[in-house]
Amino acid sequence: MEDHSQHTQPPNKATDYQKNSITLIGAISLGTGVMIGAGILALTGQIAELAGSLFPLAFLAAAIVTGFSAYSYVKLSNAYPSSGGIAMFLQKAYGKGMMTAAGALLMYFSMVINQSLVAKTFGTYTVQLLDVSANSIIIPLLSVGLLLFAFLLNISGNRIIGFFALLMAFIKIGAIGLFAIAGLWAADFSFESPAINNNETTLTGFIAAMALAILAYKGFTTITNSGSEIVDPHRNVGRAIIFSIIICVVVYILVALAVAANLSLDEIIKAKDYALAEAARPAFGEYGLWFTVILAIVATVSGVIASIFASSRMLAMLTDMKLVPHRHFGMPGTIQNHTLLYTVMFAMFLTIFFDLSRIASLGAIFYLLMDIAVHWGVLKHLRKKIKANATILIMAIIFDIIVLGAFLVVKASTDLMVIYAAVIGIVLVFIGERFFLRHAKTEDMDKMKEDMKMD
């Protein structure tokens, strides 16, 4: 419930959106900025652990599933460009109720989880240059420091964020591409290499690996949360989504092949949280390690900034829509600044208390559930309005269910705590939203009665 008594701006202006402040290239850089961060740096080893030696193909298979998923978001973005992004899409499909609020919150939490994943990756890679243990307190300190820097940059305004994201996107895409090509050349790679051609992979493990690989692509949804701020949004939001995914597919597969060519599967799994840095050692020596770590720093910094930019706007939009409670706690500034602070604080909590594997797993579960809700909403309620193809929507739902099911089966046998945490989180979201919406409805009715008495 919103506390209007402490507003520092008009109550109908919770957010401060700047129309036409993000170009098409800027939107693409925001999407790739989120994806090419944790996606390839932190998840490569975890995906290899599940998919075995065929893990490069898991990235390709996940790209196909992501392509089906992206269809709904492109159609929705072209029809309803909004800085509310997915929150607004869910409202169009389900109305202003619990399903919209809960689905949007699952997406919001998956985005914050991604921020903590990227921040933790930043700390994990940076300490490769230091003589410290893998459990050193320096890792969470570096991670929290990155989140704090991202917060300070985000409150500075859209144009600074857009310029920074664009600059970082070009640097890291070029550098990662260089790493992949040089790594393949140094390893004398061929597609007949036994490193990617053996039978150690189980079908369930491969499909479960796709769940994490899909998480590496989900950053494209960041673009939808800046819809009304992008130049010519009815055309450019969808185009930005498509171009971002294409760029990441090429980058991910090249890097995965380079890692597979330079390390054995056991070596990749052992160094799963910093697999790229380890893969650089045999190919380039210590100079390669420095190059990879600096690359990781650039990629993770830009990824966190872009993700916080989008997720805080989603939370602000949910506040505008009166679907989540909000308190100012005496803080100055707009609600947009408050949601930035809440988002960063939550990400810091996850970064300090969860390891990389569990952070990624929670993010994958929350995202896939929300994704299914979006596709079902379009299929059931919006298909004719936005002229969407039913077959593609049904295929997207089926793919999500298969991937999520396989992932849960694997986690049930290897890390049941992740499933418990996910279930508790989902239950709390639905119960909390049910209580809040019922309370808000009662307050609105009481206010209406009071207004009628005054008239």
Image (tube, grey):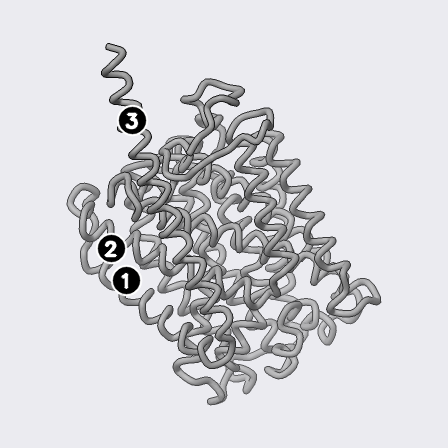
Of the residues under marks 3 and 1, which one precedes in the sequence? 1
Residue 376 has which mark?
2
Q: Position of residue 382 (x, y in %)?
A: 20, 45
Between the residue at mark 2 and the residue at mark 3, the CA separation in whole angstroms equals 35 Å
Q: Position of residue 147 (x, y in %)?
A: 65, 46
Q: Position of residue 71 (x, y in %)?
A: 30, 52
Q: Amino acid at mark 3?
A: Asp
Query: Which mark is nearer the camera, 3 or 1?
Result: 3
Between the residue at mark 3 and the residue at mark 1, the CA separation in whole angstroms equals 41 Å
Q: What element does badge 3 sit on?
A: helix
Looking at the picture, tell me which residue is in the foreground, 20 or 101.
Answer: 101
Q: Amino acid at mark 1?
A: Ile
Query: Which mark is nearer the camera, 2 or 3?
Result: 3
Q: What element does badge 2 sit on?
A: helix
Looking at the picture, tell me which residue is in the foreground, 268 or 426.
Answer: 426
Q: What element does badge 1 sit on?
A: helix
Is residue 12 visible to the viewer in this orientation of the structure?
A: yes
Q: Quadrant of the N terminus?
A: top left
Q: Give the crowd class for mark 2: few <14, some 14-19, many >=20 residues within 10 Å.
A: many
Q: Residue furthest right?
A: 131
Looking at the picture, tell me which residue is in the foreground, 382 or 180.
Answer: 382
Q: Give the crowd class for mark 1: few <14, some 14-19, many >=20 residues within 10 Å.
A: many
Residue lying at 35% horizontally and 53% vertically, measured from the top left: 70
Residue lying at 27% horizontally and 11% vertically, measured from the top left: 454
Q: Quadrant of the C terminus?
A: top left
Is residue 303 visible to the viewer in this orientation of the structure?
A: no
Q: Residue furthest bottom?
A: 199
Task: Please name the residue that numbered disc 3 is placed on.
Answer: 446
Task: Please name the residue that numbered disc 1 is placed on.
Answer: 397
